[in-house]
Image (cartoon, rainbow, N blue to C red):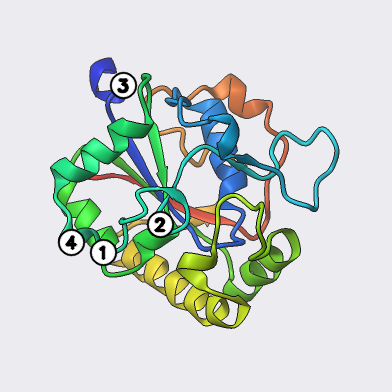
Amino acid sequence: MTLELVMSSNIWFTGVPGSKWSGVDIQLRNMLPCDRTDETPDRVHYHRVNTPGDKNNGHRGSYWGPGMGCGEHWTNLNHLTKESLETDIEDVFYGEGYRILKSHFFARHHNLDYIWNTFKNDWMILLYRESQSSFSWWANVMDFGEGHYPDYTPGYKDYNTMRPKLFEENEAIFHFGLKMGMQFKKWDPKTSVDMIPGFDAAAAAEINKSADDVYVAVARIE
C-alpha cells in the first residue's frame, strides 16, 4: 500500500456501547498515522469514573449516527450513496492520515456488508466484548442525561431499550466477522493492528493499558 493510499484510507470501526472501544480508539490514534482533525473541543468527554491524568479515558473525536454529532442520518447505509458518505466524512476530517469512523450503527441494517462491498482498500476493525459486561460498564460511566458526549438517547432511548439492542448489535458484529473469515483475538496494542501500514511499534510499546475481555478482528477490505 503506497503512502498516498494510506493517507486517504478510512478505518471503519464498530463495537457496542460499553465495550471499551473508545479506549481502543484513543490507542489507535496514538500508534497509527491518523487524521485527528475531528478531535475538536466539543468532541471530548471524560467518563465520570476517571483516574486523574488518565489520557486513555472517555471519548475523543467524531462518532457517527443518530445523536452522535456526525452523520446523524447514518442509520441504514444501504439507502445512501458512497459519494454522499464521502462528502460527510470530508466535512469532518480535513487533514492527512487514517480517518477512524466510529459507529455503533454499523452493526445494524447489514451496514457492515455495505461497507465491505463499497469501500475497497479501506480497513475494518470489529470489537467484541461480552454484552452484559459492556452494558454494565456503560451504565457505570455514562447515562442518558444532558451534558454527555455523544448523546445516546436518539439511538438507544433508555436503559431498558439499550440492553436488548446491545445484545443484538454484538451478535451482528460477531457473526459478520465470522462470515468474512476474520479472527477475533484479545486486544493487544503491540500486535493487534501491526499489519496496518504506518503502525508505530515504539508508540504501541508505551501503551500499558489493555483489557483482558476485549477482542478485535482486523481486516483490509478487498
Q: Amino acid at mark 4?
A: Asn
Q: Residue tagged by mark 3?
A: 7
Q: Quadrant of residue 73?
A: bottom left
Whichever of labels 2 and 1 marks the residue nearer the N terminus, that label is: 1
Asked whether disc 3 touches disc 2, contact meaning CB atoms under 8 Å apart, the reply is no
Image position of 218 with respect to 87: above or below: below
Whichever of labels 2 and 4 marks the residue nearer the N terminus, that label is: 4
Q: Residue at x 63, y 71 (%)?
A: 135
Name the foreground residue: 177 vs 81.
Answer: 81
Asked whether disc 1 touches disc 3, contact meaning CB atoms under 8 Å apart, the reply is no
State left or right for residue 81 relative to residue 72: left
Residue 19 in sight here? yes
Image position of 86 with respect to 105: above or below: above
Q: How far, Cα to Cα, is label 3 from label 4?
A: 26 Å
Residue 196 in sight here? no
Comparing marks 2 and 1, which lies closer to the viewer? 1
- Could you classify mark 2 by the number of other residues whose Cα lies within 10 Å: few (under 14), some (14-19), or many (20 or more)? some
Q: How far, Cα to Cα, is label 3 from label 2?
A: 26 Å
Comparing marks 3 and 4, which lies closer to the viewer? 4
Image position of 81 with respect to 195: above or below: below
Asked whether disc 2 touches disc 1, contact meaning CB atoms under 8 Å apart, the reply is no
Q: Amino acid at mark 3?
A: Met
Residue 85 image point, x, y percent: 23, 44
Q: Amino acid at mark 2?
A: Gln
Q: Residue tagged by mark 4?
A: 78
Q: Amino acid at mark 1?
A: Asn
Q: Residue tagged by mark 1?
A: 76
Dot 4 falls on a residue whose secondary structure is helix
Q: Name the outermost residue toward the top.
A: 3
Q: Residue tagged by mark 2?
A: 183
- Could you classify mark 4 by the number of other residues whose Cα lies within 10 Å: few (under 14), some (14-19), or many (20 or more)? some
